[in-house]
Amino acid sequence: MILERVVAASICNFAKLLTGVRARWAGGLPDDKVRIYYGNHRSHGDFVLIWATLPNRLRTRTRPVAGSDYWLTSNLRSYIINRVFRGVLVNRQGGRAADPIGHMGEALAAGDSLILFPEGTRNLGDGLLPFKSGLFHLARANSDIEMIPVWIENLGRAMPKGSLIPLPLLCSLTFGPPVTLAPDEDKEAFLARARQALIDLAPPAD
């Protein structure tokens, strides 16, 4: 356990050093509530930056949601996601045994916050892809949990596809006001509102 904490701190400090990441809390200062942080998805380093910018007391009980098809392809990746970050692994290929909403709900019930990316895949272009329905089902099953949108700026350019080490480029994160599922709100309306809450955090286009 001590080794994993050292590795986690090293990854955190390395990410901060290379990206110079700055965090802005537009929706109020962080507190100790169990929350779901959801962001735009540009690289495999996205969850590391969100995790690294959280206060230490929150970081130790915040877990990324990650696809098992990527993170279980090597011993090193498996060690990092399972032992260092205590990730909640989901099977994105589906199947009868897959219950991603149930697995995430168990983590929330145990007092852990989550980091997830509702686009469902890395977005290599500008803007934001449509959200997958999982965010709605998670909100409906955990209606008392606040969802915090997090816009990640520049990491797609700092860590382009295929790169193992980020380029030295300043990155910023903006944490927005919480989003919760309204009574009787349907899937399409909630996903559109949650997506817009994230878009609203993006900097103005040049």
Image (cartoon, helix red, strand yellow):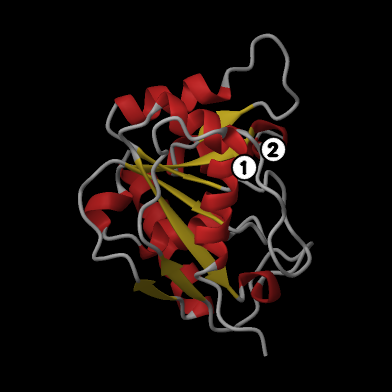
Instruction: Specify the farthest residue to the bottom.
Output: 206
Q: Are the residues at dot 1 and dot 2 in contact (C-beta closer than 8 Å)?
A: yes
User: What residue is rendered at 46% in x and 57% in y?
Assistant: 149
- On screen, 17 above or below 105? below
Q: Residues within 10 Å of mark 2 (few under 14, many from 20)?
A: few
| Front in this rendered view, residue 180 or 45 | 180
Q: Which residue is mark 1?
A: 77
**Residue 51 point in image, percent of width and height:** 42, 56
**Residue 88 point in image, percent of width and height:** 50, 32
Instruction: Specify the farthest residue to the top.
Output: 96
Locate the C terminus by quadrant: bottom right
Q: Is residue 198 left or right of residue 176?
A: right
Q: Is residue 53 left or right of residue 70?
A: left
User: What residue is rendered at 58% in x and 54% in y?
Assistant: 195
Task: Check disc 2 and report its element: helix, strand or loop.
Answer: loop
Q: Residues within 10 Å of mark 1 (few under 14, many from 20)?
A: some
Q: Can you tell which mark lies on residue 169?
A: none
Quadrant of residue 188 within the rendered picture: top right
Taking the image as drawn, is residue 79 in sight?
no
Q: Which residue is mark 2?
A: 74
* Dot 1 amino acid type: Arg
Q: Is residue 3 left or right of residue 75?
A: left
**Residue 146 point in image, percent of width and height:** 34, 44
| Front in this rendered view, residue 83 or 130 | 130
Locate the N terminus by quadrant: top left
